[in-house]
Image (cartoon, rainbow, N blue to C red):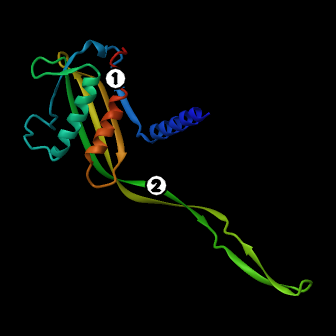
Amino acid sequence: MKTVKNICAALMVAFTIASCATPVHVEKDDSVNLSSYKTYMWVDTRYNQNDNTTRPSSYGDISVRNAANAELRNAGWTETSNDPDLLISYDVLVQNTTARKSDPVYTQSYSRAYYNPRQRRWSTIYYPSQFLGYNNYEVPVKEGTITITITDANTDKAVWQGWTTEELNYSRITPEEISASVHNIFSKLNVGAK
């Protein structure tokens, strides 16, 4: 009996954690078999060929690449510096937006005193608060979007792209948030599937 309770508790915790994950969106080329690829190389994305500016999110480069390298090694791929099968790139976007919030609204509770002539004493009637509806409003928030693109090195054709958007607690994306987002994105990468 104790084992059944422990298993149920573990399943409830796992379900709660899984339901808190941010949604991941994926676009892929269904004609490509990802299990045929074995090596990859990172490439930097630029706005155009003449863009030589340094990336402002260089602090995030290490976190994204370390998290992605761990996921790609788990998928059986190896990083190489010459003649790769795949080119991997990523983009991090932090933007200001608004989120809709709702707060319940209740009436004020009150009480009323009355005199009961039969019992010859004063009594109190309590009226509890009642639900009136919701107060809807918008608050400014920061959202971070991480996009990872996998491109075939021979054809220069994007074969897989995954992205997720998450509301940020601070103005910057923390390494923990980056690692969790990258893990969620690569959880949708089915290397064995066509």
Residue 100 is labelled as 2
Along the line of sight, the residue nearer the viewer: 67 or 58 = 67
Q: Residue type at mark 1?
A: Lys
Residue located beneath label 1 in the image: 28
Along the line of sight, the residue nearer the viewer: 29 or 74 = 74
Element class at badge 2? strand
Tell me the residue at 74%/81% (across/down). 112
**Splitting the image into 4 quarters, where does residue 17 fall?**
top left
Disc 1 from disc 2: Cα separation: 32 Å
Give percent across and percent down for residue 149.
Answer: 26, 29
Q: Is residue 74 left or right of residue 116?
A: left
Circles 1 and 2: CB distance less than 8 Å?
A: no
Graded by Cα atoms within 10 Å as few (under 14), some (14 to 19) or many (20 or more), the crowding at tag 1 reads some
Give percent across and percent down for residue 95.
Answer: 29, 50
Report the number of numbered marks.
2
Q: Residue type at mark 2?
A: Arg
Q: Is residue 10 above or below residue 30?
A: below
